[in-house]
Image (cartoon, rainbow, N blue to C red):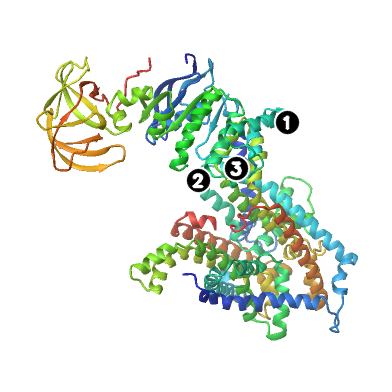
Amino acid sequence: MVKTWVKRLYMAFIFLLLYLPIIVLVVLSFNKSKARVTWSGFTFQWYANLFDNSRITDAFTTTLTLAFGSALAATIIGVVGAIGISAMKKRNYSIMLGATNIPMLNAEIVTALSLTLLFIRFIKLGITTVFIGHVTFGVPYVILNVLPRLRTLNKNAYEAALDLGATPLYAFFKVCWPELMPGIMSGFLMAATMSMDDFVITYFTRGPGINTISTMVYSEVKRGIQPEMYALSTLLFLLILVLLLLFNFLSGRKNSMEV
Amino acid sequence: MSNRLIDLQHITKIFDGEKILDDLNLYIRENEFLTLLGPSGCGKTTTLRIIGGFLFPDEGSVIFDGKNITQLAPNKRQLNTVFQKYALFPNMNVAENIAFGLRIKKKSKAYIDDKIKYALKLVNLDGYEKRKIDALSGGQQQRIAIARAIVNEPKVLLLDEPLGALDLKMRQDMQYELIRLKNELGITFVYVTHDQEEALTMSDTIVVMNGGYIQQIGTPEDIYNEPQNAFVADFIGDSNLLGGTMIQDRLVEILGAKFLCVDEGFGTNNPVDVVIRPEDVELVKPEVGIIKGRVTSVIFKGVHYEMTVLANNFEWLVHSTDMYPADSEVGIFVKPFNIQIMHKPESEDEKAVDINE
Amino acid sequence: MNSPKKTWFAFPYILWIIGFTLIPLGLVLYYAFTGADGGFTLANVLAITEPVHLKSLWTSLKMAFLTTLICFILAYPLGLVLCSLNLKKSNFIIFLFILPMWMNFLLRTMAWQLILSTNGVLNTLLGFLHLPKVHIIYTFQAVLIGMVYDFLPFMILPIYNSLSSIGDDVVEAGKDLGAGYFTILRKIIFPLSLPGVISGITMVFVPSMTSFVISNILGGSNTLLIGNIIEQEFTYNFNWNLGSGLSFVLLVFTLISMGLMSVFDKSEGGTNKW
């Protein structure tokens, strides 16, 4: 048997490894010195600059708009698609499942490249192409979250509702919808998270002047990191922390923890 | 059946501040089929897990074959367990499951192969060596779990509600199977169940438990015919459980009427509990009965009729091969030796006196 | 409520897949096997045998293998430790362990540049301790550290999920039959957690083989992965044919590694959760 203190020590080690970069960013975001990583006094300067810098605020808005817009579109396409797929016979069902897995398993750079090749032929690269790209890799997350729930959906309950005089539509929204909701929600959130975290697809499919946080950070890193980036990181981390905690408390804990 | 193989002495186990077992004393003899019987939460599984080494008691000691094994790890004990949900290793086939314990003991391949063959024959699953675990039915998995345990030649086999997950027919078949196995192997079985029928069918000794205390220890006949307290009477079989007053030796007053009985030593004018089994309640003509009543329901049960009779404000449960139609007037008579007198419980835990001595 | 009519609901999604997954992949194939003049050629694909490309392919495979191995070595014991915690606490602790995963991955990689660079946090700390500086940034090791850091949660989660689904009863059965802790680990727990390990490996190996961002930020021009070459050909040299040809090679390698994994992964499950 392994001793408890060894377990604790090991957990602490991994914990430190995972949080070390975040701690560094948070500490540096309050550091007066612009160029160096040595501590030279406390300041809120970078946070103040953050909101004056239209490049950063634009990227932030673009990221959020893209995330929620593409996740919403992916959810609609995905839920309707999942309903259709769930009614399919076994062979077509597996074909669809295989096709759904392609964007998830394929190397990001290949997906990005393939989309770009398509876009370049037909439309100008811009926000639309980025949007289509994000929807494309978002849909599989919705499908894979909703499909298992559709499969285990209690048909008896739906039929019982019809038996008790409900119309099919009423029965669907009263009986099936509540059972599907958690799957739809986590599919939506995963699609949104993936969109927010995406760099590769955006980088290839974007037109000139369009920046998400990821692509902006990338060019910052290439040019030399400005301290505003540290402030941005800290704020984003806080935002994520608060959102996740809220989400965990709101949705009956157990489900969300597996996300 | 003489030798004390396992001795549990003053065992106390506390979970989250709650006493699951309270000063439990019990010995198990060699070659005995002993059943721990009780409702869920009575402490029977805890007792078994303490014997198996999966739990350690907070107080008291476990003596095995004269040696104190209280703190010994389960993998060092000379006993094996058949788990509630079989706990077969799904990543191994039948033969690998059975061989598991023997491989750890570094037995030769020939010996292991022999043992697997023997064990599979014993549980009537010859030729199943290469089967995958998830391809087996519940009953077959159960048998493999038993085979996996017995190839290690344990002195004691612990069985934790092993039939709980099987359907009724399979459960009855397995009961006979277990009795046969026990006789062929000649080892001690410690069996945990909440099913009184299983306990009555298979056991040499039944230990009835409730609330962390032993309520009664005895043969199935003892437990059924001479329950020591109201809990045991109520838990084992159907019964009419009544309050009464012991007027003097061999005479008890129940529901205002005087009944002759055979019990002595309960004092005079002492409140007691009385149990009368439904098959011992005899329905007679109203004028010959000790008390009169009216039949309120009749259900045909195949072998007998189950009737309820309202007499002196008590609903009597009656099993009889003679049928009295509902609403008819009947008399109730009980032979003296069919009336079982019991002490009122002394504490709310219905702590029974240690009667294993 | 199963009816043939309902399968029509999938129609928009099928169109989407055809339009934005299958046709684009077809285009990659088209470009991969045609030259600048539009005629058929194998040159783009065979370009992988050029020493520069071969070297970067080898570096990518080495990087992916080492990243996966280190992630596994770090994650498996952690999974065991997390599973041995009592349930009430463990949910929150697991939350803490996957929280960094939600942080924008470019920002996380940027942080490692700050830590590892020549005048970075690590060397400043070493300076305080009067120890010699280390030069890690823009080396293979720096990229490896960044990769391990970024992909570790993807190894932790599936391993933890599969470990936590192993019942206490089989572990107890192992003890009951005389097995010690390490025997149980080797013969029962590890084989049963294999689906989680496999999906962890898949989720780490392919992305680390094909990534170009981490190597770009932490590896500079010294550590060229195959992804970097493709990106350069595509965005700087505008050689779509060569870029597609190398992408095709990458696709083949992805398929091979997936195929290898699925051979090991006899049972399903584990892969859906992340």
Q: CA distance from mark 2 to mark 1?
A: 45 Å
In the image, what residue occupies the spot 26% across and 25% down? B345
Circle 3 residue: C81
x and y, in percent, of residue B160 in the image: 48, 34
Residue at disc 3, secondary structure: helix
Residue at disc 1, secondary structure: helix
For residue A25, what is the image quadrant? Answer: bottom right
Task: Look at the numbered discs 2 and 1 and tell me whether their residues touch, using CB distance below 8 Å.
Answer: no
- Residue B24, placed above or below residue C161: above
Badges 2 and 1, same chain? no
Which of discs 2 and 1 lies nearer the camera? The answer is 1
Question: Which one is in front, C233 or A21?
Answer: C233
Q: How many other residues sit within 10 Å of disc 2, few (<14), some (14-19) or many (≥20)?
A: few
Q: CA distance from mark 3 to mark 1?
A: 36 Å
Which of discs 3 and 1 lies nearer the camera? The answer is 1
Circle 2 residue: C89
- Residue C109, placed above or below residue B113: below
x and y, in percent, of residue A243 in the image: 50, 62
Circle 1 residue: B109
Amino acid carrying label 1: it is: Lys
Question: Which one is in front, C26 or C218?
Answer: C26
Q: In this image, A1 relative to B213: left or right?
A: right
